[in-house]
Image (cartoon, rainbow, N blue to C red):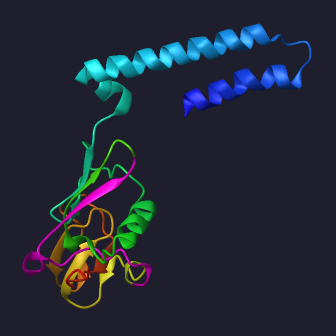
């Protein structure tokens, strides 16, 4: 992306301004392309350079719960991720054994077999939007922040994983493919 923007900027100036010479823009083109090719070559030769340039895959769901960062923080925005899950016909996080954010921005999902699906945090808006901070009837509830699911009695409860108190009734439906 940065290469495309830099090339566009270098090419645009001589086109719009008569007093800007073409040769400096060509030099910028050549330098940008040489640096880009050098970085690609280095990344192909060294895993460390590739990791720095491309990044590493990140596990974002494990066993139906969102992986939390060092300080109990979620590493991504829920809305966009839930949209991606819905596009993959996922109704709740209890259907997902593991989800990995790949270096190219796509998400790889690995599912529980139907017999191992557990209650989980709904990703469908009509269910997710029924969240509450006080449980009014006992049952299986999922933390809206980290997806931790447990049986809760009536009353106020704090999540044991992320220490938030935002709950929604957990879904336990099997995955339809």
How far across and down, in percent of the image, does residue 140 sit? 19, 83
In the displayed structure, 98 sits above or below 14; it is below
Pick the quarter of the image with the C terminus.
bottom left
Magenta residue span: 105-126
Q: Residue at x 82, y 19 (%)?
A: 14
* Quarter where residue 153 is shown: bottom left
In the depicted structure, whether residue 125 falls above or below residue 56: below
Q: Is residue 156 left or right of residue 85?
A: left
Front residue (pair 136, 88): 88
Apparent side of residue 170 relative to residue 33 in the rendered image (left or right): left
In which quarter of the view is residue 124 placed? bottom left
Residue 121 lies in the magenta stretch: yes
Q: Where is residue 101 shown, x and y percent of the image?
A: 31, 50
Q: x, y (%) of residue 5? A: 63, 30
Q: Residue furthest right?
A: 18
Q: Quadrant location of the N terminus? A: top right
Seen at 33% across and 52% down, the residue is 74
Question: Percent x, y for residue 47?
Answer: 24, 24
| Viewer-closest of 37 and 87 | 37
Any part of residue 68 in sight: no
- On screen, 164 above or below 20? below
Which of 61/147 is in front? 61
| In the displayed structure image, the side of residue 12 where residue 144 appears, left or right | left
């Amino acid at each position: 992306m940065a290469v495309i923007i830099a090339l566009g900027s270098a090419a645009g100036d001589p086109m719009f301004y008569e007093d800007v010479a073409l040769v400096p823009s060509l030099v910028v083109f050549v330098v940008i392309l040489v640096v880009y090719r050098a970085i690609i070559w280095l990344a192909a030769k060294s895993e460390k350079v590739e990791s720095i340039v491309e990044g590493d895959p990140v596990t974002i769901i494990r066993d139906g719960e969102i992986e939390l960062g060092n300080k109990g923080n979620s590493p991504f925005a829920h809305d966009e991720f839930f949209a991606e899950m819905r596009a993959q016909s996922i109704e709740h996080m209890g259907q997902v054994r593991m989800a990995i954010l790949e270096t190219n921005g796509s998400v790889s999902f690995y599912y529980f077999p139907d017999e191992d699906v557990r209650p989980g945090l709904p990703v469908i808006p009509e269910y997710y939007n029924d969240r509450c901070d006080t449980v009014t009837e006992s049952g299986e509830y999922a933390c809206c922040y980290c997806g931790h699911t447990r049986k809760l009695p009536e009353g106020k409860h704090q999540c044991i994983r992320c220490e938030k108190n935002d709950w929604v009734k957990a879904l336990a439906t099997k995955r339809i493919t």
